[in-house]
């Protein structure tokens, strides 16, 4: 039997090697072959699964040794997954980046390891870039641009961006899709589905099929750059009343499904405190404006930019006005929230801010959490159950609480997996967006600031009042609703003024003077 197995293995190796030699001579990259990509994914899945199945056989559950070993298994499994994403590129890196953003949903070993994928994106060669432009725009680079920088400004999982100058002297950013991504994406998603089903069969508690469902729905949209251009224009028009928001203008005559040409805008990453300090940009102002912008998107309009990682959100001083601006990039991934969902989400956040526990339970259940509503509230806010009971606006975030939440993400992984399969699909991208925004606030040291809760409360009050007015049968009732809305907004303004006065230098000076005189 062993002899037969050796012969079969030798034959398979010879066939594989000769195939590799043949494709090498043909100038083909083995990484582009579905069989190679599937083989890598299958081997990685098998190795990770075997590790989890066998590592804990001789260790007693719940002991310190068990948790230490589990952390090691998580880490080496995350590293294998990261290496697979880097090898298969494209859709794999995109999904890996998505997992790396789920700070409070997955064990820290996974999120911290997969975060590096933002800097490990592949680059297409200049010849491949020329070929895509030639195929889609029907002209050579020199016919379209006076200059075109060969070194990309940035490379991502699906595309890379080059700085160029048009013949009229306009400086633009040209986003060009990696040529092989479109062809490989569907096969890659099917591959992931097969792997995840196999893992779910081995580990019934591991139910991450929502990940594949989201990839199936969102990947075609992200690969259509015309859709991205339309999203950019829609959000720019929708939030035009925010003078601090800058969305690059699209050059439609040089854009296709695989190419997006837009205004070139420079700035520093939103989590770069040193850049802000050098430019004289207020960290608190940026954090407050980011909160306002996302509160409007989520609670008022229901049209949400769902990929706010630091590379997609820049800050700068406007060259003309010298005022601080937030530059929003990469508009491929948006979530449209249904009105009923958005209303329940508003009511839930109001309950969470106030510590209204019956409200937290009621609206969590309405959003599909069921009996897992306490876990849902903790996942949504990244706060402890103690803080939620007290009202998250009244309890500051502590380091120990943050550690507790991250530890619980590993302890309650099966329950979190169950929860993510229960809630509406709209919720999944919102959870990712929340985690990315929290990451920015943590870096800026503005986490759980009063200004963010005030912005959220304002938007929730307006949205709920607008809904009630639409259902009101009489003018008198609509007037009552409007007056109640105005009163609640006025109370928030007074509270905001109180916080400003409390934190002002004048108050500190008077307090110090009073203490000195006393």
Image: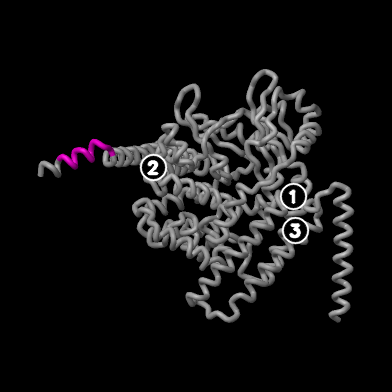
Residue at the (53%, 60%) spot, across then down: 108
Report how far apart the C-alphas of labels 2 and 1 lie in the structure: 41 Å
Report how far apart the C-alphas of labels 3 and 1 lie in the structure: 10 Å
The secondary structure that dominates the magenta segment is helix
Q: Position of residue 264 (x, y in %)?
A: 60, 29
Is 98 in front, or is 384?
A: 98
- The image quadrant of residue 42 is bottom right
Span colored in magenta = 504-513
Quarter of the picture containing the C terminus is top left
Residue at the (51%, 57%) spot, across then down: 104
- The image quadrant of residue 53 is bottom right
Q: Position of residue 339 (x, y in %)?
A: 55, 45
The label on residue 134 is none
Q: Position of residue 111 (x, y in %)?
A: 56, 57
- Magenta-drawn stretch contains 28: no
Residue 402 appears in the rendering: yes
Quarter of the picture containing the N terminus is bottom right
Is 496 in front, or is 198?
A: 198
Compare marks 2 and 1 and give the one earlier in the sequence.
1
Q: Which residue is mark 3?
A: 191
Compare marks 3 and 1 and give the one earlier in the sequence.
1
Is 491 in front, or is 464?
A: 491
* Crowding at mark 2 (Cα within 10 Å: few <14, some 14-19, many 20+): many
The label on residue 451 is 2
Residue 380 vertical placement versus 281 (above, below): below
Report how far apart the C-alphas of labels 3 and 2 lie in the structure: 44 Å
The label on residue 185 is 1
Residue at the (80%, 27%) spot, across then down: 139
Is disc 1 placed on a helix, strand or loop?
Answer: helix
Compare marks 3 and 2 and give the one earlier in the sequence.
3
């Amino acid at each position: 039997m062993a002899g037969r197995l050796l012969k079969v293995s030798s034959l398979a190796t010879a066939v594989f090697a000769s195939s590799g030699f043949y494709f090498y001579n043909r100038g083909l990259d083995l990484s582009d072959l579905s069989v190679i990509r599937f083989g890598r994914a299958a081997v990685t899945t098998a190795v990770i699964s075997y590790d989890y199945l066998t590592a804990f056989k001789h260790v007693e559950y719940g002991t310190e040794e068990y948790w230490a070993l589990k952390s090691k298994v998580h880490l080496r499994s995350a590293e294998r997954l990261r290496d697979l994403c880097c090898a298969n590129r494209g859709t794999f890196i995109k999904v890996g980046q998505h997992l790396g953003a789920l700070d409070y949903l997955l064990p820290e070993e996974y999120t911290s390891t997969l975060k590096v994928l933002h800097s490990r994106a592949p680059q297409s060669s200049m010849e491949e870039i020329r070929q895509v432009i030639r195929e889609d725009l029907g002209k050579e680079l020199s016919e379209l641009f006076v200059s075109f920088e060969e070194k990309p400004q940035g490379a991502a999982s699906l595309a890379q961006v080059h700085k160029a100058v048009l013949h009229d002297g306009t400086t633009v950013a040209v986003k060009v899709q990696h040529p092989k991504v479109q062809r490989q994406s569907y096969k890659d998603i099917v591959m992931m589905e097969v792997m995840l089903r196999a893992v779910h069969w081995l580990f019934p508690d591991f139910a991450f099929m929502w990940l594949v469902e989201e990839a199936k729905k969102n990947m075609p949209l992200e690969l259509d750059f015309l859709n991205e251009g339309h999203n950019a224009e829609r959000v720019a028009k929708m939030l035009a009343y925010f003078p601090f928001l800058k969305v690059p203008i699209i050059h439609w005559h040089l854009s296709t499904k695989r190419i997006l040409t837009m205004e070139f805008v420079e700035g520093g990453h939103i989590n770069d405190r040193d850049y802000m300090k050098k430019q004289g940009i207020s960290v608190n102002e940026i954090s407050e404006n980011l909160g306002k912008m996302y509160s409007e998107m989520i609670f008022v309009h229901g049209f949400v930019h769902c990929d706010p990682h630091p590379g997609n959100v820049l800050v700068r001083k406007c060259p003309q006005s010298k005022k601080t601006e937030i530059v929003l990039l990469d508009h491929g991934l948006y979530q449209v929230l249904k009105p009923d969902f958005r209303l329940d989400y508003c009511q839930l956040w109001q309950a969470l801010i106030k510590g209204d526990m019956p409200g937290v339970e009621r609206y969590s259940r309405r959003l599909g959490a069921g009996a897992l509503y306490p876990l849902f509230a903790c996942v949504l806010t990244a706060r402890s159950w103690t803080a939620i009971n007290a009202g998250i606006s009244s309890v500051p975030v502590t380091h120990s609480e943050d550690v507790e939440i991250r530890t619980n993400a590993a302890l309650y992984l099966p329950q979190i997996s169950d929860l993510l399969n229960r809630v509406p699909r709209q919720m999944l991208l919102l959870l990712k967006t929340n985690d990315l925004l929290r990451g920015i606030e943590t870096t800026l040291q503005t986490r759980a600031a009063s200004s963010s809760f005030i912005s959220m409360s304002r938007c929730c009050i307006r949205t709920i009042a607008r809904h009630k007015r639409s259902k009101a049968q009489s003018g008198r009732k609509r007037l009552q609703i409007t007056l109640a809305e105005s009163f609640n907004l006025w109370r928030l303004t007074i509270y905001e003024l109180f916080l400003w006065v409390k934190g002002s230098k004048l108050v500190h000076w008077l307090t110090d003077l009073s203490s000195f005189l006393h």
